Amino acid sequence: MWQAEHVAESLKKHGFQTEIVPLVSKGDTDMRPIDGTRQVGLFTKRIQQALVDDEADVAVHSLKDLPTEPDSRFVLAAVPPRESVLDALVFADNSPLLETQTDSDSPLAYLPQGAKVGTGSTRRLAQLKQLRPDLEVLPIRGNVQTRLAKLNAGEFDAIVLAHAGILRLEMTDLPHRLFPLDEMIPAPGQGALGIEVRSDNAEAMHAIASLNDAAARLAATAERKVLSELHGGCLAPIACHAKLETSDQGTELCLRAIVMSADGKRRLQEDACVAVEPNDADSQVVEAHELGALVAKRLRDKGADKLISTVRDDH
């Protein structure tokens, strides 16, 4: 609802009238752990159906939940400015763990041996296990409030949440520490919104185009291309982070991507950059796609397909 209201407010500032259409997706009601067998579009299909049925003109998604498979009925009309891409380790209210003296930048330094950490993400599970094999990483589902209730009830010593969600819900007073990017690489598209319209709705497409942020869209395009090429879906421990970097030599789009085993013992990583033309939006998108495809190919050459299929077989 925050996301929908945020987009509505942004559209109003550009002179467009809006109406919120609240919907409930299967992902909101099905609390079983994500196992990859039935999850594609879990959070998005109901919202996309509203476009098909003309219930709504605009669909607002968390971009990391939006399937990468193309669907000619819809157009990703805009990616607004991106929020924080970081992950946060959240502790219970009044947790004594935060009183631990530590000189480390790692949030995990606050956790004792064998601590219980909750996450619904295989990507986070794999990176946590690589960093701290001793941790007991347990599945958790539900909205932020549900997860916090379980944390404060003592089911976990800490849980991992997206920093973007904490900021958007104005819950910055939560006791939390942020993972640096060299410890926890985000999901493709994390922190970004994806705004869809029907491909035949030119009026909505025009309105939504005013919200697009070129840098956010390029980064998300490269990240999602990796996911698409690897056929990763929700299950595979695939993490990506892309960003524009400007120097005296010009502007580059740089991308880091990893594929991991669920136990964190195997990690494949690739980094690459591509120069982008500063005033040519069409060529920038092509370059972002090519960068994602290149990094995905290098990962596949290292054995990413086998690693991803092994994780699927385990489920």
Image (tube, grey):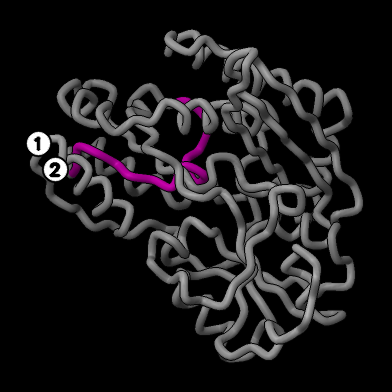
Q: Residue furthest front?
A: 248
Percent x, y for residue 291?
65, 19
In the depicted structure, whether residue 125 falls above or below residue 256? below
Q: Which residues are magenta?
A: 56-70
Residue under pointer 2:
12
**Which of the image's four quarters has the N terminus?**
bottom left
Q: Is residue 169 above or below residue 48?
A: below
Q: Nearer the viewer, residue 180 or 234?
A: 180
Q: Are marks 1 and 2 in contact (CB under 8 Å)?
A: yes
- Based on the displayed image, in which of its 4 quarters is residue 212 positioned? top left
Within-10-Å neighbours for mark 2: few <14, some 14–19, many 20+: few
Q: Find numbered disc 1 in the image and state the secondary structure of the residue it sits on.
A: loop
Camera-nearest residue between 155 and 282: 282
Query: Could you say which is closer to the camera, residue 315 or residue 112?
Result: 112
* Local crowd size for mark 1, using a 10 Å CA cut-off: few (<14), some (14–19), many (≥20): few
Q: Which element type, helix, strand or loop, lies under badge 2?
A: helix
Which x, y percent locates residue 119? 65, 66
- Tell whether 241 sits left or right of 216: right
Q: Residue at x 71, y 74 (%)?
A: 117
Q: Amino acid at mark 2?
A: Lys
Q: Is residue 264 left or right of residue 96?
A: right
Seen in the picture, residue 312 relative to 71 is either above or below; the reply is below
Horizontal placement of 270 versus 231: left or right? right
Give the quarter of the figure containing the C terminus: bottom right
Q: Amino acid at mark 1?
A: Gly
Residue at the disc numbered 1: 15
Quarter holding residue 274: top right
User: Residue 62: x and y, percent?
Assistant: 43, 47
Q: From the viewer's perspective, is 205 left or right of 171?
A: left
Q: Residue at x 45, y 42 (%)?
A: 82
